[in-house]
Image (cartoon, rainbow, N blue to C red):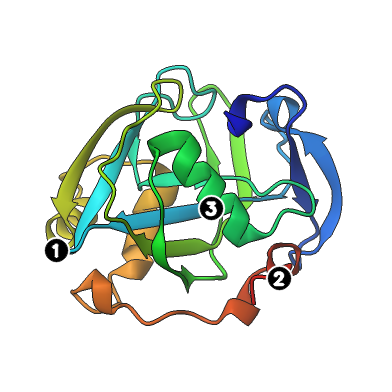
Amino acid sequence: MAETLVGERVVLLDPAGAAVGTALKSEVHHAATPLHLAFSCYVFDAAGSLLVTKRAASKPTWPDVWTNSFCGHPGPDEDVVAALARRAVDELTIRLSDLRPVLPRFRYRAVMPNGVVENEVCPVFAATTADPPEPHASEVGGLEWVPWSMFRDDVLAGRREVSPWCAWQVAELAALPDDPLAWPPGDWGALPPAALGSAA
């Protein structure tokens, strides 16, 4: 799978979201993780239920933690749409439809108990799929479909523990319509400059 290939690189960013270099993904996460480009995706079925996944125990950051459908890092010169399609296959063996940015400016920094830091400009996308997910064990430790309103309310009330980025994202997504299939697309042009490529 692409995510586990030796030598995979992530895109380093300046505070404005422009690319300033690259680093090996295997070496970028530590106590002083530099700002880099990522994405999160929320995948829904035709009924508006969210595909929620548990990160594999082998993940170096937030292992065994429940989170949104999948995340990833565009490679150098990789279109963000292509990167999303790649990660959907790599993690869940699904194809995406109706892909759209919903939080194009999302950015966060989170610290694990062991001091390892995530520091990402991480635009958030929504999509649908008609495919039954077939997760890869090296990426996904579990999954379930949950009605969006139930997931949202449980996360907001603290009844469901999720990754820190997912909790912050849900807090912002809660302002959108109750039906996630009716979420309006955000502005592609609001994505960080390093993510724009040919996506706009």
Q: Which residue is mark 2?
A: 198
* Labelled pair 2, 3 in contact (Cβ < 8 Å): no
Q: Is residue 102 left or right of residue 24?
A: left
Q: Which residue is mark 3?
A: 84
| Image quadrant where residue 156 sits | bottom left
Q: Residue at x 77, y 26 (%)?
A: 7
Point out the residue furthest to the top here. 58
- The answer, for residue 163, to whether it is visible in the render is yes
Between the C-alphas of marks 1 and 2, the distance is 31 Å
Q: Mark 2 or mark 3: which comes first in sequence?
A: 3
Front residue of 169 and 138 = 138
Vertical arrangement, residue 97 with respect to residue 30, above or below: below
Between the C-alphas of marks 2 and 3, the distance is 13 Å
Between the C-alphas of marks 3 and 1, the distance is 22 Å
What is the secondary structure assignment of the residue under circle 3?
helix
Image coords of residue 29 (percent x, y)? 67, 31
Q: Residue at x 64, y 70 (%)?
A: 199
Q: Is residue 129 left or right of residue 61?
A: left
Q: Mark 1 or mark 2: which comes first in sequence?
A: 1
Quarter holding the C terminus is bottom right
Vertical arrangement, residue 105 with respect to residue 154, above or below: below
Front residue of 12 and 45 = 45
Vertical arrangement, residue 131 with respect to residue 179, above or below: above
Q: Residues within 10 Å of mark 3 (few under 14, many from 20)?
A: many
| Image quadrant where residue 153 sits | bottom left
Image coords of residue 142 (percent x, y)? 27, 28
